[in-house]
């Protein structure tokens, strides 16, 4: 008699020979939806987890109830309630950066707003894009830690 563990082991081992397209198809078969942009390694891990869940059983309902209760009491568990993190600045703080032999100066207006060359911006990233012409992390561009 073949043990369910042997079958599971063979199914998981077979994932290593599948290309990205085959893994995406297997993912859709097991989860019921098309995976987002990802790589083969990630798909192999997620498919293996799902195969184990199907073969060995998922999380018992009593444990799921405990997890839901913990999540309901944790404000960070609901990503919809998380606001984007704004750079906490003191009004009047100056940020300077030398870029291509020119010094650029930005002044903090408070409440996550900044002023550069007489215009108001909502982020340092927006200003870095104006200066460089390409996307930058504003904190990195201005050396803010």
Image (tube, rainbow, N blue to C red):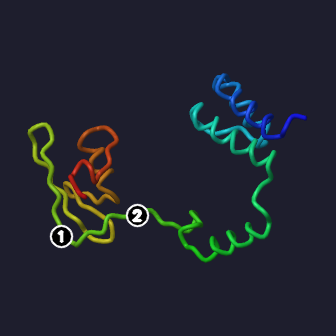
Residue hosting label 2: 85
Q: Position of residue 19 (x, y in %)?
A: 64, 23
Residue farthest toward the bottom in the current orientation of the protein: 73
Work out whether 5 lies above or below 139: above
Disc ID at residue 23: none
- Residue 31: percent from left, percent from top: 76, 43
Which residue position holds label 1?
A: 92
Q: Residue at x 77, y 37 (%)?
A: 8
87 relative to 47 in the view: left or right: left
Residue 135 picture quarter:
top left
Quadrant in which the N terminus appears: top right
Specify whether 49 is left or right of 58.
Answer: left
Q: At 24% from the left edge and 60% from the top edge, which residue is drawn?
A: 115
Spot occupied by residue 130 in the image (x, y as percentages of width and height): 28, 45
> Residue at (35%, 60%) from the top-left corner?
122
Front residue of 31 and 37: 31
Q: Which numbered disc flags the more N-terminal residue, 2 or 1?
A: 2
Residue 65, placed above or below residue 143 = below
């Amino acid at each position: 008699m073949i043990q369910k563990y042997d079958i599971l082991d063979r199914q998981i081992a077979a994932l290593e020979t599948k290309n990205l397209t085959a893994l995406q198809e297997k993912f859709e078969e097991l989860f019921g939806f098309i995976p987002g942009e990802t790589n083969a390694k990630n798909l192999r891990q997620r498919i293996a987890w799902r195969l184990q869940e199907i073969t060995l059983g998922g999380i018992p309902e009593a444990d799921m109830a405990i997890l839901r209760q913990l999540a309901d009491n944790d404000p960070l568990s609901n990503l919809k309630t998380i606001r984007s993190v704004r750079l906490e600045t003191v009004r009047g703080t100056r940020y300077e950066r030398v870029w291509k032999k020119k010094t650029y100066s930005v002044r903090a207006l408070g409440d996550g707003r900044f002023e550069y060359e007489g215009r108001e911006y909502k982020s340092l990233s927006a200003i870095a894009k104006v200066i460089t012409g390409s996307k930058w992390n504003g904190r990195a561009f201005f050396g803010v830690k």
